[in-house]
Amino acid sequence: MRQLLAIFFFWVATIMVLGCSGNDTPPSGDNNLIDVHQINLANDSLLREAKKMIQTGDLVLRKGNDFSSDQVRSMSKEDKTYSHAGIAFVKGDSVLVYHVEPDFYYINDKVRKENIDSFFNRAHNTEFAVARFKLDSIETKVLLNYLEDRYQEKVAFDMGFDLKSDDKMYCSEMIKKGLAKATNNRITIEVQRMNDKSKYKIIKQYFKLQEKQFVNREIIPIDRLYLNPSCTIIKRFTYQQ
């Protein structure tokens, strides 16, 4: 009889302990959901902070997470952080971005005005930044008018990276030319020659160009924009993963 009672009380105690411990420790799946929610909240906070500080005419930068972005970043001379750039403008409660990027289907390869939330989309980017050129109000207006004209003209992305043509442009080229016009060449963006032989194979494969089309050609890597003496990085942001 004593043995039966001992066994009975042992199982009662075990059930109580297990029941209590179950309340204290949520299942691992719940922990994962909590972590994802906290990460999303933190990243949303970064985006809100960036949007609050952006002024019309600001340079906005992002680091894409795909292969092509890696190749673009590798072209930069000093800071290889960012792969794409645009010029932001504030319209009411919204922040939009003028920019142009390649599309091998030639559907979305024209200059566009894109909402900043989409431009900084966390699904395709790991970092972003806000930078500012030294522009007065008149220069800023001229810059925005220049970009709006390129948008209305539906200027396409320049797969040949030819600075001599204006009917097609790539992102940093459009910004360079817009700044030159807006400031009467007070702000000039440095160019560098494409002579890194280690990049030739990738350029030929990715952009479908012959070597003679790009060797020693002048290009504008992304870092030439924000490392310019007339530009200041306001803040850099890194998404939590």
Image (cartoon, rainbow, N blue to C red):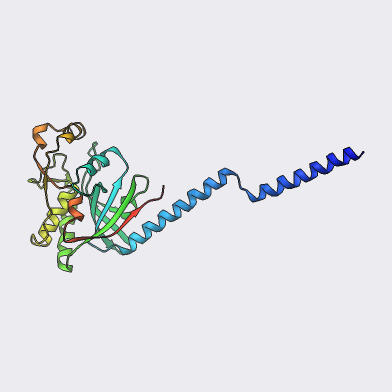
Q: Residue furthest right?
A: 1
Tell me the residue at 18%/35% (across/down): 199
Toward which corner of the image does residue 177 lie, by quadrant?
Answer: bottom left
Q: Quadrant of the N terminus?
A: top right
Identify which residue is drawn at 15% across, 57% down. 146
Report x, y in % for residue 20.
70, 49
Residue 207, compared with residue 238, is above or below; it is: above
Q: Residue at x 57, y 46 (%)?
A: 30
Check the image and name the residue furthest to the bottom. 137
Locate residue 57 relative to residue 20 in the image: left or right: left
Q: Is residue 106 above or below residue 52?
A: above
| Closer to the camera in the image, 79 or 181 | 79
Side of 8 relative to 123 (left or right): right
Question: Is 39 placed left or right of 9 in the picture?
Answer: left
Residue 109 lies in what quarter of the image?
top left
| Along the viewing direction, whichever of 127 and 112 lies nearer the viewer | 127
Which quadrant would residue 184 be assigned to in this image? bottom left
Q: Above or below — where is 105 with respect to 173?
A: above
Q: How many marks?
A: 0
Q: Decide: is 157 above or below 143.
A: above
Image spot of residue 78 (x, y percent): 20, 49
Q: Position of residue 48 (x, y in %)?
A: 37, 60
